[in-house]
Amino acid sequence: MTLPSHATDCHVHVYDPARFAAPSPVPTATWSDYARMQRQLGLQRAVLVQPVGYGFDNACLLDALVQAGQAARGIAVIKAETRWSELSRLHQQGVRGVRFMMVPGAGGVLPWDALERISWRIAELGWVINLQLDGRDLPDYQERLLALPSRLSIDHVGKFLEPVPVGHAAFKTLLRLLDGGNTWVKLSAPYETSRVGAPLYEDVGVLAKALINSHPERCLWASNWPHPGRDPKPSDSAMLDLLSHWATDGAWRRRILADNPAVLYGFDD
């Protein structure tokens, strides 16, 4: 697959425990480590997402953004009462969103009752709420998510912990969110939910194809590097190659890899 200029990996975690201690053990996966893989695949831009293990301490993320320069943007974790001056400082450092990790047992630190408060705070900056949840719960939150004033992105093909058919009520809710014009979805980490498995993860792939066919302008691609908690880890090149199976049209792949992330994360600001 030939990659377009400014091809973007929209979900990357960076860990550097030798320089930035975490409350609990985290792997070593530095920006330099990622940059080598990025060059090997021909990717040029990245979105760094605050790992669960660092909680509210964004120091490692911000340091990686300095190393990456204008080639990366960040998704931080902040408290609802964070001052405007701090939000402005984070914006200048390349942060463009806030992470909500709502998968049960995953260790996210922001509660559901902070969602609207933070969304209102960040909307003026053009930031995005980066949401990960069990996609089967989407119908329970549909109205709240449609009403958010900020942009919204949903991780990992909706992350249906039990893959669902395209006619399932929860998948239809995801499509309605995309219809609303303020929501994006990441085509990433099929290995986290697939029951079929490699190489094509067909039970998740059918959902990815449906999302691309209906909303190519709302889809993003991501590696989920360094694949936290996976042993053995999947091939990064195989994760990228999946996109050629899901999006058969070259113009769609350009939108997914370059155009859509440029708009959502402000790479051209």
Image: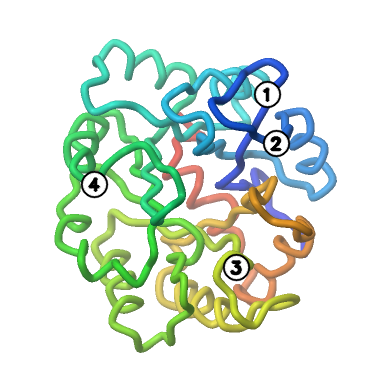
Question: Mark 4 or 3, which is nearer the eye?
Answer: 4
> For residue 190, which numbered disc appears in the image?
3
Disc 4 marks which amino acid? Trp
How far apart, in angstroms, are the residues tagged by discs 1 and 2? 7 Å
Q: Tag 1 or tag 4, which sits nearer the N-term?
A: 1
Residue under pointer 4? 112
Nearest to the observer: residue 109 or residue 23: 23
Q: Tag 3 or tag 4, which sits nearer the N-term?
A: 4
**Is 195 on the left or on the right of 226, as rendered?**
left
> For residue 27, which numbered disc appears in the image?
2
Question: Mark 1 or 3, which is nearer the eye?
Answer: 1
Give percent across and percent down for residue 49: 52, 38
How far apart, in angstroms, are the residues tagged by discs 3 and 2? 21 Å
**Is 121 on the left or on the right of 188, as rendered?**
left
Disc 3 marks which amino acid? Pro
Quarter occupied by residue 154: bottom left
Residue drawn 77% across the image and 64% down it: 238
**Is 7 on the left or on the right of 168, as rendered?**
right
> For residue 17, which numbered disc appears in the image?
1
146 in relation to 127, above or below: below
